[in-house]
Every structure is written in structure tokens, then in C-alpha cells.
Amino acid sequence: MNKELRQAVIAGNWKMNKTRPEAKALIEELKPIAEKASCGVVICVPFTNLETAVELTKGTNIKVGAENVHFEKSGAFTGEISADMLTEIGVEYVIIGHSERRQYFGETDETVNKRTKAALAAGLKPIVCVGELLWERECNITEEVVARQIKLDLFDVSAEDVKKTIIAYEPVWAIGTGKVATAEQAEEVCKLIRDVLAKLYDKETADAVTIQYGGSMNPKNAAELLAQEDVDGGLIGGASLKAADFGVLLDEASK
Ligand code: 13P
């Protein structure tokens, strides 16, 4: 990461984990650990834990994010949550287009783009996820796949807004599998993303965007991944559910 140009951010993605009492316990454990971090600290939690998380993290350096957001302002969208509903309770970030949503819930680049624009319009900071399937990597089309996702997901997003957006490069084959991308592979694609951003916008804008790596990042492999020039932090699944492990990642990103 290059701290002169942009902020490193470690964001936890709790996915569908933690009841309210469990969430409270984890946040209380996390607070003293996160206190000394100089990187950005975000926890993205299930909708049912958002108010609890916002309440418990008031006055701390931990920011709260949701794991999805709908693109319409309100209306007949049973089961969905709008950006205004999130900002109104103090949520600051939102994960958009996670591969699990693309894979299991029919999320497309078009809906990712709509959600991203709706989130930005409401003042939320989106964490937009991109990444290739194992099959796509084996077919040598990782660059095309990721470049296409970036172009479609950020279509019509201004330079000013893209600077408020975090991009998370998450190779799908590395998520929850224990198969981490090598530091070289992570850097290669994060740099490619920055090059695509520089073409879409300009170099100064591209240099200002935080680009995270996600996929089996843990206390053992974090240092090497985070040492890469274009890897500006991580989006963390499993290791964000244990305060001690998350703490190691915060330490590494704060170096
Ligand atoms: P794991 O860290 O559990 O592989 O999950 C990564 C992820 O999907 C974060 O969004």
C-alpha cells in the first residue's frame, strides 16, 4: 500500500454470522484492539446488528457498514433495505456486489452499478467487490473479467464519487477456501484495477482509490499481501469473526 496517496482500510465482512448478543461480545472485544490502529477500521455486519454496532462503536475509530443495499429509495421491494434507511441509523459503508450475492442471489453488474450510485447519492461509502471465478483464471481471462466488472460497476460514477469508493478485489476461488492468492497475483490484479481506473478517470483519481484484497486473508499471510504497492488493505471474512485475528490484520495494515 502507498499511504502517501491513499488510506489503507481493513473491513470485516461478517456475512450471515452473529446473533445480537454475539455481535455485542465481539465488538466489545474489538474496541480496545482497534483503538491503536492507524488504518481505517470497518465492520460490515448483518442488518439486524447494524443499530447495535453503531451504538457500541460511537466515539471509537470503528466504522460500521452494511452488507448490501437496494437501489430504489422506497417502495414495493419486499425484504430490501434502502440507502436512506442505512444512513439514518448512522451506517457509513456498504458492501456491494459481493461474489456470494452475484452467485446465489442473481446480482449482476447492472444492479451493482445501480446500488453503487444509490449508495453514493445517499452519502454511503460503497465497497464494490470484483473478482474472477477459478474457471475464468484457468482460461486466462482474469484481466478481461475484472476490467469489464470495473467498467460496468462504476459506469456513470463521477471522479469525485469514485474517490469515496473502495474496490475490493476478491478472487472467487480464494473466498472461504483457505486458498489465498499469492501476493504477486493480488498485486497484479489490484494494479490492473488501478490502471483501468486511470484510463476511465485520470491517474490522480486512480491513485486516490483504496483497493483491497479479499479471500482467505489471515494473520499468517496478511503482511506479505499488504506490503504490495497497490493492495490498500483487505476485506476479511472468517478472520473478522475473531477479535484477536482481526487485530493482527489491523496491526499489519497500520505499519
Ligand atoms: P474469507 O476471508 O472468509 O475468505 O472471505 C473473504 C470475503 O468474502 C470477504 O468479503
Image: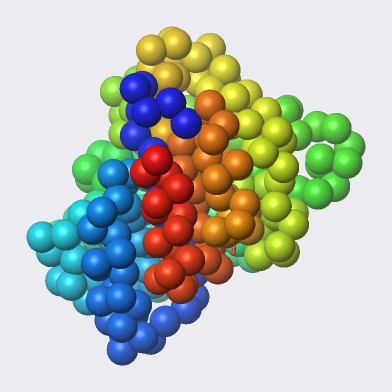
Q: Which residue is at 57% across, 32% downward?
A: 228
**Residue 231's x, y, as percent?**
53, 35
Outermost bottom residue: 21
Q: Which residue is at 70% across, 33% downward?
A: 184
Res. 254 image quadrant: top left
Colour pattern: rainbow
Res. 153 in view: no
Q: Report whether 192 appears left or right of 27.
A: right
Q: Which residue is at 52% across, 66% downward?
A: 239
Outermost left residue: 59
Q: Report whether 144 appears left or right of 157.
A: right
Q: Report whether 133 appears left or right of 6.
A: right
Q: Is residue 164 above or below residue 85?
A: above
Res. 42 in view: yes
Q: In terms of depth relative to the viewer, which is nearer, 94 or 17?
A: 17
**Residue 28's x, y, as percent?**
25, 76
Q: In terms of depth relative to the viewer, which is nearer, 195 or 184?
A: 184
Q: How many numbered marks appear?
A: 0
Q: In terms of depth relative to the viewer, which is nearer, 69 or 143?
A: 143
Q: Is residue 125 above or below residue 24?
A: above
**Residue 81's x, y, as percent?**
33, 64
Q: Is residue 245 above or below residue 148?
A: below
Question: Where's ligand 1: which quadrant?
Answer: bottom right
Q: In terms of depth relative to the viewer, which is nearer, 110 or 104?
A: 104
**Residue 70's x, y, as percent?**
38, 56
Q: Which residue is at 40% across, 40% downward?
A: 255
